Amino acid sequence: MKSKRIFLGILLCLSVSFSCKKSNEAIIETVTPPVVTPPDAVPSLATVKTWLVDKNATDETASLFYNLKQSAKKNVLFGHQDDTKRGVTNATTQWANEQQFSGVSTTQSDVKTITGAYPAVYGHDFIHMTNFSTGNWFDYEKAIARTLTIEAYNRGGINTYAWHYANPVSKGNFYWSDSPVTAVNQVLPGGTANETFKASLKIVADYAKTLIGADGKLVPVIFRPFHEMDGGWFWWGSGHCTPAEYIAMYQYTVKYLRDDLGVRNFLFAWSPDRNFNSQSQYLTYYPGDEYVDLVGTDNYEDMKANVSPNVAATKFKIVSDYAKAHNKLAALTETGLQNLSRSDWFTQQLLKSLKNQNLEFAYALLWANTKDAYWTPYAGHPAANDFINFKNDGYILFSDKMPSVYKLN
């Protein structure tokens, strides 16, 4: 987490530099719908949509849910944050599709350079679109994110968006230590930041509606707001709000995007960090089945080189088992070993943690590459051959072997 914090902090600072209690008594909905087990036969789109948070989701979004659910029974898709946005060519040189650079191709990919194939899942972030800073870099970041998302969809890939959202009360950093101002209980109706929050959600919604693929269809997005809430590093995290306040905020986010703003191409994901050892602990901040399509977990600490793969796998099983029982998708939404200090980490740590508990994870996503903190190897790195072996394992699917996901198969 420390290395990811450094990456996000530097990224935010660089982007800017290159441009010139009274708590709300919100009603928390806790009704959980009956669990519906998908039939063996391919269901109709109308049936699949009854399983989703958004019953009026686009056909492509519903198809993505179903096909990921089916794929997870036998395979895990490989994902990479910012895969065509930024990367490294060696230990000291990085590249990025950012405004201050020129001539960087939107098809460049560290994963493809080493393995010959793009990842199946591309990670993006709403971090800049809803930032409270100003400058012409803002428009560029929105434009490049749109381009990379649409290009990923056009080649059959899957897009997921995290949201490192700046504190809407202080207008400061999303890290609590940088801007220790209570906000979760102020974004709900009646709170001082409700209008600010709604304006940010409208930016997200308006952007989502501009994601139009070459087929003329809205690009589906797995939207993952307010992640790692079981840790204290974000303003929405543990110690800075109650579970009830967090749940109310997550539910409000879903309802406002879906019901007030009419977003129809989102699957909603929820993912705490690694701080659980039972289902009850895992569900401490869970918004409820009516509000979540994908349950996940972020885990870096248990994936370090000196930790047994069984430690993470035991937690992964809790996530997977919940998804199986409640007709949800499951995923390892963030993971990685910084700078790959273990040369066989992919096959001996990541692969083993995914294989040994009969999991049904739709995908596993590694974090973004910079020269100071990279998570996939560059050419000549000691882990490059192991990464290729990982890619060639029949259990892991990259873009070249992933199924078609936007129509019912």
Image (cartoon, rainbow, N blue to C red):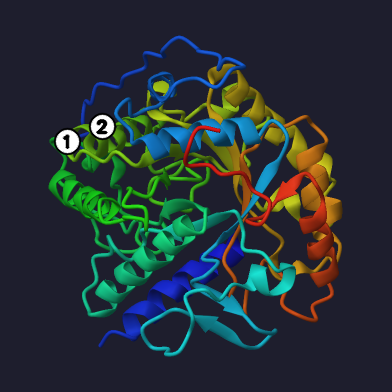
How many other residues sit within 10 Å of disc 2, few (<14), some (14-19) or many (≥20)?
Answer: some
Q: Taking the image as drawn, is residue 154 in sight? A: yes
Task: In the rendered structure, find residue 284 and report the number of the disc placed on it.
Answer: none
Gap in Å between the C-alphas at discs 1 and 2? 7 Å
Q: Position of residue 360 (x, y in %)?
A: 68, 32
Specify the amino acid type for callout 2.
Lys
For the C terminus, the quadrant is top right
Q: Position of residue 81 (x, y in %)?
A: 54, 61
Q: Do the CB atoms of the residues marked 1 and 2 lie less than 8 Å apart?
A: yes
| 88 displayed left or right of 154 | right
Task: In the rendered structure, find residue 255 and report the number of the disc placed on it.
Answer: 2
Q: Is residue 289 above or below residue 217?
A: above
Residue at numbered disc 1: 260
Q: Position of residue 401 (x, y in %)?
A: 68, 51
Which quadrant holds residue 258?
top left
The residue sitting at 37% across, 78% down in the picture is: 15
The residue sitting at 39% across, 33% down in the picture is: 242
